[in-house]
Image (tube, helix red, strand yellow):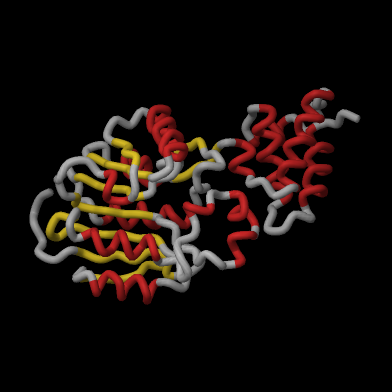
Amino acid sequence: MPKNIKQALEEAASSLSAHPDSSPQLEAAVLLCHLLEKPRSHLHAWPEKMLDNAQYQAYRTLLERRRKGEPIAYITGRREFWSLELEVTPETLIPRPDTELLVELALAHLPQENHYRIADLGTGSGAIALAIASERPDCEIHATDRSSAALAVARKNGDKLGFNNVHFHLGSWFEALPGHDRFRLILSNPPYIPEKDPHLAQGDLSSEPREALAAGSDGLDDIRVIVSEAHSYLHPGGWLLLEHGFDQAAAVQALLLEAGLTEVQSHRDLAGHERITEGRLPHEITSA
């Protein structure tokens, strides 16, 4: 039986309330806006507007996908990051607000009015590289990923946003980077969850690509590779920034120090957890 917008939202919120880790009212609204291709303001302005039968049935289909655990971002195919609307697919990780801290810290290491080369390793949907590109069109950013499907999404996002200072490369970590030039800054949100961590089977993580999440028995396999090779790709005085698990800061700091990096420190995310660790290659220089 067709319903108006208000009734449909109330019914949807009720049906989603049993889903763990959900925000029923918000998710109900997001899915209806996606279906109607309207902003949230439309729902508030026209609560009595009737959905036709096709719209109502389509909405119920979207709700059923969510009830079965499919992430909202994969249902809508979109996710906002750094105020950029990005396409996401099951081949990419879903960009998360906490990762914006990685962007903030990277920008803090890029003095204005200088042309710098930056590498984003394991770019996924391109979120980090494109966020930096939006703030620093004067910089040259090289983004890599070993998944051709993920890289296709990243390229599509870059084309849609019209940024011409981001270059995408297929391959694993540093192997994908072109030429022999070094970088002022290298950053990555690599896989860092231990392979047997039960969280991999919970919530949105259960739907995201496992190869972009898990990295060995302690979650640090890929971070070890990046840290061990970074000195060959960083300019003297350049920075390496890594996102990692909430309980891995001490281990990542130790890896950076062992690799000879200095000024090593960790930064806390919105929840107060140390989630970003950075270090600097010695011997500061004045330009890249």
- Left or right, residue 1 beside residue 17: right
- Image coordinates of residue 253 in percent, x first then y, are 32, 73
* Residue extending furthest toward the right: 1
Picture layout, residue 58 above or below residue 134: above
Picture layout, residue 73 above or below residue 284: above
3 and 240: which is toward the camera: 240
Report which quarter residue 161 is drawn in. Answer: top left
258 and 54: which is toward the camera: 258
Residue name at image x 73 percent, y 37 percent: 62
Residue name at image x 25 percent, y 44 percent: 177
- Image coordinates of residue 6 in percent, x first then y, are 80, 37
Picture layout, residue 35 above or below residue 288: above
Q: How many numbered callouts?
A: 0
- Image coordinates of residue 234 in percent, x first then y, are 18, 55
- Left or right, residue 280 beside residue 122: left
Residue name at image x 50 percent, y 52 percent: 96
Picture layout, residue 109 above or below residue 151: below
Report which quarter residue 138 is drawn in. Answer: top left
Report which quarter residue 156 is drawn in. Answer: top left
- Image coordinates of residue 218 in percent, x first then y, are 46, 70
Residue name at image x 64 percent, y 59 percent: 202
Q: Where does the N terminus fall, quadrant-wise?
A: top right
- Left or right, residue 271 beside residue 17: left
214 and 252: which is toward the camera: 214
